[in-house]
């Protein structure tokens, strides 16, 4: 009897503490300092409005007032960090070659038309700019725009070079980097812990486990950004406003990708996401303007 009461009160105490800390996380954790906040994020620079990952796309997005550019990095044979999505160039240029097998000067231009990965049966017709840019070009052109860097290969030289560029351009406070692989994220964090990292996929699953068992409020987190794919059924079922609020109260931003229509924009902001990543920056901008979703800052 006594033991039962003890267990019951302990469990009740745990549940209450967990609930309290879920709502007021700063009682236990120091809030991470956000050096920027992004609501409007242009996926590959806005792959639905310009050729993905080109300077023309990034310029268009920045002119629109995007809060952040999302882009992907690879390493060429001559160790240049380039901004491009696939390891192989066939889809984007028609040439069946790997970026890692070519020197920067040998990279072919993009096709005139590219399929938009996250929009069914949609092709984007580009303008003049078909060049695969260097990461350095992006940093030179947009010194004040936050950038989300996906490290596309598990390659130590790539990670070191990106870190060096970010440090050289004094952009540690304007950068987040990572990959779905936990190994890559660990390497990034080890290479330069001053650059904030994303949750890798295994860490997202761990985060959900902690949340649903009530343990999350007690656990310290090193990541500063949660990026989750929303159109998938699983994330729709698992993601909760209470989780997003808890994370954002701890200074961890929540970005949802890749959303291209208004219904999805609305749902993401209703759920308490910090920002939305889109292939159509103009569409998202108009939606935000019309619905009074202001820029933060
Ligand atoms: C990293 O990439 C460079 C350039 O493509 C290549 O020479 C090197 O072998 C790669 N390193 C690893 C560990 O894969
Ligand atoms: C993570 O890296 C792997 C290769 O290590 C790559 O295939 C994948 O596209 C990357 N994912 C992201 C989200 O950058």
Image (spheres, grey):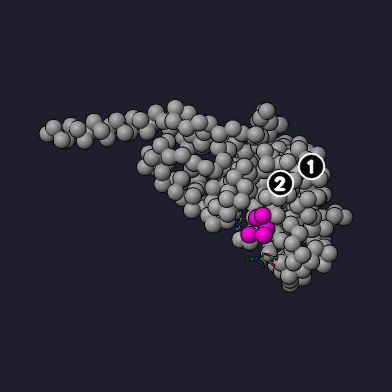
Residue closer to the observer: 153 or 65: 153
Circle 2 sits on which residue?
A: 166
Circle 1 sits on which residue?
A: 142
Residue 140 sits in which quadrant?
top right
**Image-based side of 221 in relation to 10, left or right:** right
Count the marks: how many?
2
Residue closer to the observer: 81 or 65: 81
Q: Main secondary structure of the magenta part?
A: helix
**Image-based side of 216 in relation to 148, left or right:** left
| Residue lying at the far bottom of the rendered structure | 96
Q: Position of residue 125 (x, y in %)?
A: 80, 56
Residue closer to the observer: 61 or 285: 61
Q: Position of residue 227 (x, y in %)?
A: 57, 46
Residue closer to the observer: 29 or 168: 168
Residue at horizontal 61 percent and vertical 61 percent from the top: 154
Q: Describe the element under mark 1 as helix, strand or loop.
A: loop
Q: Position of residue 117 (x, y in %)?
A: 67, 57
Q: Is residue 141 visible?
A: yes
**Image-based side of 127 in relation to 12, left or right:** right
Image position of 246 with respect to 189: above or below? above
Residue at horizontal 38 percent and vertical 39 percent from the top: 214
Q: CA distance from mark 1 to mark 2?
A: 13 Å
**Residue segment shown in magenta:** 156-160
Q: Position of residue 17 (x, y in %)?
A: 35, 30
Q: Quadrant of the N terminus?
A: top left
Image position of 122 with respect to 69: above or below? below
Q: Is residue 85 visible?
A: no
| Residue lying at the far right of the rendered structure | 128
Quadrant of the image where one finds ligand 1 = bottom right
Image position of 37 with respect to 134: above or below? above
């Amino acid at each position: 009897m006594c033991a039962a009461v003890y267990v019951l009160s302990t469990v009740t105490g745990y549940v209450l503490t967990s609930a309290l800390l879920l709502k007021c996380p700063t009682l236990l954790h120091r809030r991470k300092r956000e050096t920027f906040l992004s609501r409007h994020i242009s996926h590959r620079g806005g792959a639905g409005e310009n050729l993905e990952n080109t300077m023309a796309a990034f310029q268009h997005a920045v002119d629109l007032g995007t809060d952040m550019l999302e882009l992907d990095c690879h390493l060429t044979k001559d160790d240049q960090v380039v901004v491009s999505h696939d390891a192989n160039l066939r889809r984007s240029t028609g040439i069946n070659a790997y970026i890692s097998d070519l020197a920067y000067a040998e990279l072919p231009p993009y096709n005139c038309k590219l399929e938009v990965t996250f929009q069914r049966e949609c092709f984007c017709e580009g303008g003049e700019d078909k060049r695969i840019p260097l990461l350095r070009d992006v940093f030179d052109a947009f010194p004040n725009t936050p950038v989300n860097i996906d490290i596309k290969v598990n390659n130590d030289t790539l990670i070191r070079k990106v870190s060096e560029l970010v440090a050289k351009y004094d952009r540690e406070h304007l950068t987040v980097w990572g990959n779905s692989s936990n190994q890559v994220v660990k390497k990034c964090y080890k290479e330069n812990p001053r650059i904030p990292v994303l949750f890798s996929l295994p860490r997202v699953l761990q985060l959900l486990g902690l949340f649903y068992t009530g343990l999350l409020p007690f656990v310290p987190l090193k990541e500063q950004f949660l990026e989750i794919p929303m159109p998938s059924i699983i994330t729709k079922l698992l993601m909760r406003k209470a989780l997003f609020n808890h994370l954002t109260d701890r200074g961890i931003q929540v970005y949802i990708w890749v959303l291209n229509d208004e219904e999805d924009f609305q749902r993401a902001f209703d759920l308490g996401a910090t920002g939305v990543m889109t292939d159509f920056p103009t569409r998202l901008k108009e939606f935000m303007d019309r619905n009074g979703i202001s820029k933060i800052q």
